[in-house]
Amino acid sequence: AQTVTQSQPEMSVQEAETVTLSCTYDTSESDYYLFWYKQPPSRQMILVIRQEAYKQQNATENRFSVNFQKAAKSFSLKISDSQLGDAAMYFCAPGVANAGNMLTFGGGTRLMVKP
Amino acid sequence: KAGVTQTPRYLIKTRGQQVTLSCSPISGHRSVSWYQQTPGQGLQFLFEYFSETQRNKGNFPGRFSGRQFSNSRSEMNVSTLELGDSALYLCASSLTTGRINYGYTFGSGTRLTVV
């Protein structure tokens, strides 16, 4: 079984600044994937970024990047140049390879962006 | 390209009734998963279907069931509704190969209220 901890229930960032959301997980699997999802008030979950655990290089998608520390089982999300539209709940989710697409979600971090 | 379509968007049911929720995945996606989202428990995995077969199942009572049709559309059914079944039910579809987890595309969800 996997457990996922997002230790920051809420975070706030000034528009145009940088913010980092933390996530730690526990898994006994060696081959897995890690995801960050965003859920704005419209409630539709949107994939932000995906990391393959066997790759040492950290994933990047435009203003979004991750700091993946496999040994520490840490997977933080950095948002640069924050925009008002980034305000949402953010969920971290690992998923095991070779086991379908099931993901275990953390409790989420609510990000507020101040103009 | 059409997204994941869930119907209905909102539903109000009475305790003891049953309900059926529908999900049409993205064209070409053969994997469909269902999640329950509540403020107290967060996002919890219900089940995953692939090629009309249940591939994974979460820890929910037998009142929760699902199925997938040959066109990959999926339905989930909840019988003998309880107040605690009030939640946002999210459907997600995914490309899948045996090993690779590409992540989900989510629908907008069905908000079920049991009174």
Image (cartoon, coloured by chain):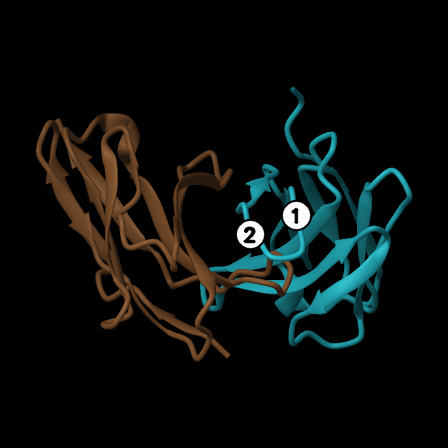
Chain colours: A brown, B cyan
Would residue B66 be visible to someone looking at this image?
no
Q: Is residue A95 left or right of residue A34?
A: right
Residue denoted by label 1: B96
- Residue B97 % position (x, y): 66, 50
Q: Residue at x 51, y 79 (%)?
A: A1
Using the image, name the chain to which the residue with label 2 belongs: B
Front residue of B87/A58: it is: A58
Query: Residue B23 shows which numbered tag?
Result: none
Would residue A69 be visible to someone looking at this image?
yes
- Residue B84 % position (x, y): 62, 69
Q: Is residue A6 above or below residue A16?
A: below
Q: Is residue B53 above or below residue A40?
A: below
Q: Is residue B33 above or below residue B26?
A: below
Using the image, name the chain to which the residue with label 1 belongs: B
Q: Is residue B31 left or right of residue A89?
A: right
Front residue of A21/A26: it is: A26
> Upstream in the sequence, badge 1 or badge 2?
1
- Element carrying mark 1: loop
Q: Is residue B104 left or right of residue B34?
A: left
Front residue of B24/A113: it is: B24
**Residue reaching furthest top?**
B1
Q: Residues within 10 Å of mark 1 (few under 14, many from 20)?
A: some
**Amino acid tagged 2:** Asn
Q: Is residue A104 left or right of residue B78?
A: left
Query: Residue B101 shows which numbered tag?
Result: 2
* Proximity of marks 1 and 2: CB atoms separated by less than 8 Å: yes
Q: Residue at x 69, y 58 (%)?
A: B114
- Residue A67 % position (x, y): 21, 53
Q: Residue at x 74, y 33 (%)?
A: B28
**Amino acid tagged 1:** Thr
